[in-house]
Image (tube, rainbow, N blue to C red):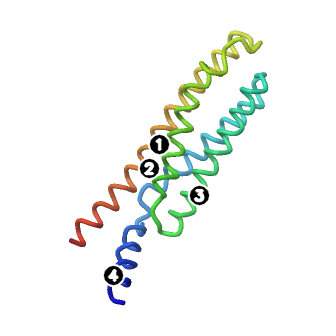
């Protein structure tokens, strides 16, 4: 019985984020999602490009919102969820190559779409990776202080 209580206490310590460390990362990830959706409506892109931008934008909003809600309740961000932002960022980097440039976009609109994907992809991957790293680092610090 005492062993179960110890495990629950240790697990709760791993999930606590009393200082709300890294809380600013999640809204930035969500804002990247809002940006991707807004740009999908502004630029005249193909159906595949449009839906890719909208779905990835919604995914980033969901990831950012979920981890922000955890951090607002003094819990750590979920590192697995943060890694979803990394995967979404990597997709954004690859999307211009996979979905193609011959979408009927004017050259200047395509350049904006292309460079936007690279920039937002790098930011999403970087912020997601940093969020996952901070969460894992905090959990390891907690384990070391317990031992």
Q: Residue 127 has which mark?
A: 1
What's the distance in space between the residues labelled 2 and 3, CA to CA? 13 Å
Q: Residue at x 61, y 55 (%)?
A: 65
Q: Residue at x 48, y 37 (%)?
A: 125
Q: Secondary structure at mark 3?
A: helix
Mark in the foreground, 4 or 3: 4
Q: Residue at x 43, y 55 (%)?
A: 22
Q: Quadrant of the C terminus?
A: bottom left
Residue 55 point in image, percent of width and height: 70, 39
What's the distance in space between the residues labelled 1 and 3, CA to CA? 15 Å
Horizontal arrangement in the rendering, residue 18 relative to residue 28 (left or right): left
Q: Quadrant of the N terminus?
A: bottom left
Horizontal arrangement in the rendering, residue 4 relative to residue 72 (left or right): left
- Which sits earlier in the primary sequence, circle 4 or circle 3? 4
What's the distance in space between the residues labelled 2 and 4, CA to CA? 27 Å
Which residue position holds label 3? 66
- Which sits earlier in the primary sequence, circle 1 or circle 3? 3
Q: Residue 131 has which mark?
A: 2
Q: With respect to residue 38, does 81 lie above or below?
A: below
Which residue position holds label 4? 6
* Residues at discs 1 and 3 in contact (Cβ within 8 Å): no
Residue 84 point in image, percent of width and height: 53, 45
Q: Secondary structure at mark 1?
A: helix
Residue 10 point in image, percent of width and height: 35, 74
User: Relative to the observer, which residue lies in front, 131 or 140?
Assistant: 140
* Residues at discs 4 and 3 in contact (Cβ within 8 Å): no
What's the distance in space between the residues labelled 2 and 1, CA to CA? 6 Å
């Amino acid at each position: 019985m005492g062993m179960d209580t110890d495990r629950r206490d240790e697990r709760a310590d791993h999930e606590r984020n009393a200082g709300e460390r890294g809380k600013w990362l999640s809204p930035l990830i969500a804002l990247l999602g809002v940006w991707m959706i807004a740009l999908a409506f502004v630029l005249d892109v193909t159906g595949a490009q449009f839906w890719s931008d909208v779905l990835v934008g919604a995914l980033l909003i969901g990831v950012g919102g979920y981890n922000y809600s955890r951090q607002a309740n003094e819990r750590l961000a979920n590192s697995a969820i943060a890694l979803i932002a990394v995967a979404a960022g990597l997709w954004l980097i690859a999307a211009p190559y996979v979905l193609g440039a011959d979408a009927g976009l004017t050259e200047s609109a395509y350049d904006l779409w292309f460079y936007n994907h690279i920039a937002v992809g790098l930011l999403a991957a970087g912020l997601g990776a940093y969020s996952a790293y901070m969460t894992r680092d905090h959990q390891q610090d907690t384990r070391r202080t317990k031992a």
